[in-house]
Amino acid sequence: MRGEPFEMLKFRSMVPHAESLLDSVRATQDDGNGRLFKSHLDPRITRVGRVLRRFSLDELPQLVNVVRGEMSLVGPRPPLQSEVDGYETDVIRRLHVKPGLTGLWQVSGRSDLSWEDSVRLDLSYVDNWSILLDLQILWRTVRAVTKPEGAY
């Protein structure tokens, strides 16, 4: 949050030792955007986890983060520290606003976007924030969750 780490709540959708398996899975399958690892058939995701992710239900606990003031309903998704460590200077601007439960790139293609497109959309949000934009993103989020393309 604004460049400071915080604990983001989320339902577990992967096996408990998922992080230790990341390198072996990454070596054989990566459907991500060149920067962030994503896999349509990630073996670390549980059956229940697939359903949670498909409908973005794994994100619901983040409403607690919103109530605590650590997150907003709309904004760039909170990155992992390892992702922030690799940010170029301009990308740091993503951290100038509170992270959000949903954001512009989530409603514009989710995991199917390239890294560059994801960053462009997040920076556009940061530079052009308005209440109307937030309302549009919230409306589009309903559609994105009910038609979960790019959710994996």
Image (cartoon, rainbow, N blue to C red):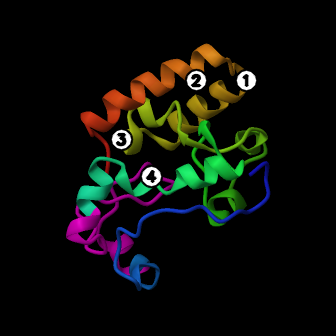
The amino acid marked with disc number 1 is Asp
CA gap, disc 4 and disc 2: 18 Å
- Characterize the local packing of mark 4: few (<14), some (14-19) or many (20 or more) Cα atoms within 10 angstroms: some
Q: Earlier in the sequence, mark 1 or mark 4?
A: 4
Q: What residue is pinned by disc 1?
A: 127
Report the number of discs: 4
Q: Which mark is residue 146?
A: none
Q: Earlier in the sequence, mark 4 or mark 2?
A: 4
Whether label 4 touches label 2, CB < 8 Å: no
Q: Position of residue 65 (x, y in %)?
A: 62, 54
Q: Residue at x 69, y 19 (%)?
A: 128
Say whether residue 109 is visible.
Answer: yes
Camera-near label (3 vs 4) is: 4
Camera-near label (4 vs 2) is: 4
User: Can residue 25 be found in the magenta stretch?
Assistant: yes
CA gap, disc 3 and disc 2: 22 Å
User: Could you tell me which secondary element the residue under label 3 belongs to?
Assistant: helix
Q: Earlier in the sequence, mark 1 or mark 3?
A: 3
Q: What residue is pinned by disc 2?
A: 134
Range of residues picked out in magenta: 23-49
Q: What residue is pinned by disc 4?
A: 60
Camera-near label (3 vs 2) is: 2
User: Could you tell me which secondary element the residue under label 1 belongs to?
Assistant: helix
CA gap, disc 1 and disc 3: 23 Å
Q: What residue is pinned by disc 3?
A: 112
Above or below, 73 relative to 27: above
The amino acid marked with disc number 4 is Leu
Camera-near label (1 vs 2) is: 2
Compared across the picture, whether 35 is left or right of 83 comes to: left
Say whether residue 40 is visible.
Answer: no
Above or below, 90 relative to 32: above
